[in-house]
Amino acid sequence: MSASSVIERVKTNLVSLKMPRALEILDVTLRGLERGEISALDAIDALLTEELTMRENRRIKMAVQMAKLSAIKTLAGFDFAFQPSLDKNRVLALAGLQFINRAEAVHLIGPPGTGKTHLSLALGVEAVKAGRSVYFSSLADIVASLAKAERDGALRERIRYYCRFALLIVDEIGYLPVTPGGGNLFFQLVNARYEKGAMILTSNRGFAEWGEIFGDSVVATALLDRLLHHAVVIQIEGSSYRLREHADLVPETIRHKTQATANPIPPTLKRRSRPPKDGGADHVDG
Ligand code: ADP
Ligand code: MG
């Protein structure tokens, strides 16, 4: 068989095997071989590695879309030096994803612009890369979706849907007051996931303000009871990354108003949990 007919067969086989990336780089790889620039082993390695890398990237891209991760953020792209109150090692430890296996709740608390959404997205991306199922949503969207499901008589199915994901990221607790009845619906979801699935929750408000946020102190206490048992609390006490170049333009009064409450755990819940030691990060486990 001539070399050219073998090459044709290799191409046909790559098509049959659905290896488009290997097919794409076949000619250039063969040229490298002919010129003695690469060995036969290098050539095989290049074809397989390129194909696998492309597949892996496609899988991650699909999974990121499925997870509704609103933007691709990475831990590598996070400037820890800008946020000295944040313990980098605690965040990197979370990227090991053991908290997902342990079905823990991770709380990221801090004023606007301190990187809560960025970090939650980055951890979501890490989880997706590791093949875990992830879903990202704001609290307002989750509550709206649960309320709609309830009106349609499909609340149970909707809760089951949210329970399918190994990691549920609930962003923006506290920016908007929860609609009436929303706290109760969210509690049903949290209760269904309790000790079964991990969550990341971001908030600009301390736990003591959850009664106000959810418009119901009984529901807030029940929520925190679940969400602080087996929990990691990471508090960021820095300034806004968004405003880093314009901090001098923001009035002092507004800067202070945006600070999260210093003591994030309400006294009623201290039986089960320890408050953060140093405003950094703390493991709250019962
Ligand atoms: P938050 O959710 O706490 O309000 P975000 O995570 O949305 O804040 O951060 C606001 C913007 O600033 C985003 O574009 C984010 O990627 C960026 N950002 C925040 N903190 C950092 C940081 N320490 N290093 C790099 N980018 C950051
Ligand atoms: Mg945010």
Image (cartoon, rainbow, N blue to C red):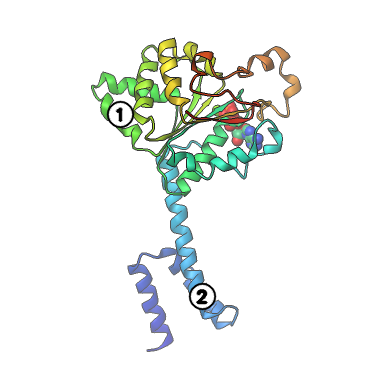
Q: Secondary structure at mark 1?
A: helix
Residue 74 showing in the rendered view: no
Specify the farthest residue to the left.
153
Tell which quarter ligand 1 is in. top right
Position of residue 256 measured from the top left corner of the image (x, y, whole percent): 68, 15
Q: CA distance from mark 2 to mark 1?
A: 50 Å
Say if disc 1 is inside 8 Å of ligand 2: no
Which residue carries the number 1 mark? 158
Query: Identity of the amino acid at label 1?
Result: Arg
Please give left or right for residue 40 compared with residue 260 in the image. Answer: left
Residue occupying image coordinates x 59% and y 42%: 92
Q: Relative to residue 19, is residue 240 depicted above or below?
A: above
Judging depth in this view, the residue of 143 and 226 nearest the camera is 226
Q: Relative to residue 99, is residue 56 depicted above or below?
A: below
Query: Identity of the amino acid at label 2?
Result: Ala
Position of residue 4 measured from the top left corner of the image (x, y, whole percent): 42, 83
